[in-house]
Image (cartoon, rainbow, N blue to C red):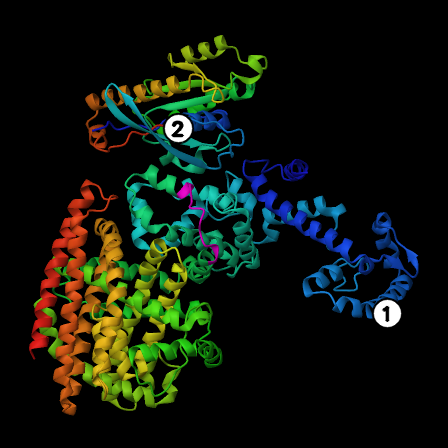
Amino acid sequence: MLRRILLMWCLQHPEYGYRQGMHELLAPLVYVLQVDIDKLSQIRKLHEDCFSDDFDGVPFPDTDMVFSYKPRKDPKWSSVADNENDSESASKVNSLDELDLDTKEIILLSDAYGAEGELGIVLSERFMEHDAYAIFDGLMDGGGGVVRMAEFYSPSSIGSSSSLPPAIEASSALYHLLSIVEPSLHNHFIELKVEPQWFALRWLRVLFGREFCLNDLLVVWDKVFACSNNMVLNNDEEYSFRILCSERGAFIAAMAVSMLLHVRSSLLATEVNVSCLQRLLNYPTNVDVQKLIEKAKSLQPIAIDANTPSPSFLLKRDICEYDRVNSNHAISTPPRTPLHPLSESYWEKQWRNLHNDGTSPKETERVHSSSGEIKKSWRQKLGLSRTESLPSPVMKVVGMKSDGQNSARRCLLNTLSDSAERSHEIAGKIQQDEFPAVSVHKESPVSSAESSQLQATGQRLTVSPPCLAKVSPLESSPVMSADESETQRAQCAAEACSSGENSPVFYAANAGSEHENVEDNDSERSSITSNSCAGDNDRDENLQDESSCSNFDGKTVQDPEAATSDKTAEPDGSSGRAVVSNERKPFISKIQWLLKLGRPLGEGSVEKGSGETSDGKDGVDASCPDANSSNSRGNTKLASGDKKVVGTFKNLGQSMLENIQVIESAFQQDRSQPGPMENFSNNILGGKGQVTATAALTELRKISNLLSEM
Amino acid sequence: MCPQGVRSNAGVRRLAFSLTRIRYVHKKFSQQYKATIGADFLTKEVLIEDRLVTLQIWDTAGQERFQSLGVAFYRGADCCVLVYDVNAKRSFNTLGTWHDEFINQAGPSDPNQFPFILVGNKVDLDSGSRRVVPEKKAKDWCVAKGNIPYFETSAKDDYNVDTAFLCIAKLALENEHDEDIYFHSVAEQATKTEEQTSGCAC
């Protein structure tokens, strides 16, 4: 049958002909049909009476069914039939209701007279081959939509704007998306001269059929086919890649990128293109498809967005350009100022796309309600006193709600690991740009005044509800324009929050993908949660002074400290220590794998200019506000004349010290046992990274000493 | 240090070659081998004259046309292995096209000296009773193309496969030596530790 269908298709489409791989598209379709039909006949046997072909007392044998269509078109007949069906189905209801829903549906769907949905017989053994052909043809042809599987087999493009073969174009679309989502991996591929079509050709042609087992594949396909294949763009709009013009195509690309991200670390560890390709073409079989799909879903809007030469495109270039500039002049230019207006609006856009205008109050409220639990646990965890809970656009909150407490904890872990990784990068950055740690010192007193203001503004923002919807920094300032100074402050706040906003989100992509590589269990979800929590934090940050500090810190080196300081700042600060000790353990374990992994990873990015700089930018970016926030905390506390502030500082310094020790010990451990994967060159680079990291650690130690001495 | 290997690409009867390749690398033969879609990559280490050489075997499906994988796929190959099925006349007849197209795409510095190898596979089939391409004819073709080595193999019976690959590796090495002498730029490439041999079959 397969052969017949394929032959028929080839004869119908001589321009394509048969190519290896087409059978692998057809086979799953036939399989599904076969399974469905088997199930049908099984049920038919069980509930024979429900399938009665009796028509007006005259039995219609199965063989006559084909002909029964004709007479039914006669109006007289059909009216009779309708009546008959009505009474028949009414009489059946009782018996049908006793059946479970699935069975009932199957029975109703196979009603020869189309009582249900007027489809007539949907499934029939006799027409299975016909159906298979029709479905296969639809798949290959794309139903007049954008993604036409047949094109992936064709050497030349038919009706496409570019001169490249569609498969190659689609492959480069995939790379394009990857370069946006995960620049370091993209750079790695470029460096190894791995061309996308070498692996993507297979992925696309059989629609991932070789990479997943059949059961997983069907799940993936379900998702693929659930996406509309219609052109999302208007005719006059320009686009870069045809495959990204429909939701389905975008999902396919997103799926592929998500698969790449899943094996990111092992890919980054490869040094030769062949081993890289081998890894790609022997995709791990024990993959959690749901995780991949979730990730792909989150990437899908980015994929669509990346297709149009829209402002976001330009912004991306700007960011890259900025990265270059920044890496050159990091000393002279304060890293924060030029960065934010650019990336902030870029991510702003990403957010909006991600949520699909879901930021409208109603929807977010709904989302919020589902995430309320998590937030509560978050609040408890961080000891935040929130006056008001706000609708926050949480990405994929749905995924989290099942285990609120757990995910919150995981978030914390993620942020911890993020922070650890960042400390690594700060180190690298500091060393590279000879950005003296002292300057962080110098800068902090200046901006601490600023940020205390900022806190005040934060308070204000919390009070004024109209601002809720206007969380975006750009929009918040006009609203507050009544008071000039206030506007300035608002901008300050906006800036701070945006720095929080862009870095964690940016980061989440990196860190998240790493997590999922390392941890087999629930890693994807955790990456998403880290994403969403980051978003959560950032939004709240706008509006709440307390959280603006602690949340922001949560993404920086001092996460535990921040938690501590928060706790201690509150009337009964005794719990502060407990938090630290609680978090120490995961922190240690996290940092260990992180260092191990972060090494080749860091090297990958060191080798690749832009990937590194963007990471580095994050690092420095984080470091400054970090210092600010801790200082500002001190300022406000001092102003309020709270005696506890000294204790807070001591605690802060001590916990900082503790954490530094943790990092150092992890370092030493790591040094004593070099990873098996690392080769000669890696070791050299690793050594460099270690030196810089250690240098940064000593600086940190100095700071913490200062603090604890206060 | 291992010398820079060059990939060899060739292809006629891709499945045949895939089987040969699989046989060679994994020392096993499976009847239910999945057809190559797009490209496939394998590595194999061989000991030649006390040197451990890693062969990178780049394989592409015979149905692929050159443009579908891009020129980069063929560039930098050290040796090109053309595999055909001795039981299928057509696979033999298309050898010339593949040969020329490879030269075209890979753009070796000296097209006349670029190492090719011809492999006639599936000699085991029905004890050779279904054979349609006589050995003589294949050898003539090889001579006409500049005396390229010819091997007859059976991936299924593991006949001659190792010998063929050993020859491939040696040829690639020799070719590399020459280039070392004549082209400085290649010497730089030689710092890479891998030797690649890519075979593509049609």
Q: Which residue in the structure is indicated by mark 1?
A: A87
Estimate the spatial distance between the alpha carbons at disc 1 and disc 2, rounded to whole Å.
69 Å
Q: Is residue A627 magenta?
A: no
Can you say which quadrant of the picture contains the N terminus of chain A? Answer: top right
Horizontally, is A579 left or right of A354 in the view?
left
Asked whether B160 or A74 is in front, the reply is B160
> Which range of residues does the magenta coloring cover?
A280-290
Task: Tell me residue A506's x, y (percent).
Answer: 31, 63
Asked whether A51 or A478 is in front, the reply is A51
- At 27% from the left and 91% from the top, the residue drawn is A483
Q: Are marks 1 and 2 in contact (CB under 8 Å)?
A: no
Question: Is the residue B12 above or below the residue A550 in the image?
Answer: above
Q: Is residue A286 magenta?
A: yes
Q: Is residue A343 visible?
A: no
Q: Residue furthest right?
A: A57
Q: What's the residue type where badge 2 is placed?
A: Val
Q: What's the residue type where badge 1 is placed?
A: Ser
Say which element carries label 2: helix
Question: Is the residue B182 above or below the residue A246 in the image?
Answer: above
Question: Is the residue A412 above or below the residue A453 in the image?
Answer: above
Q: Which residue in the structure is indicated by mark 2?
A: B25
- At 79% from the left and 64% from the top, the residue drawn is A115
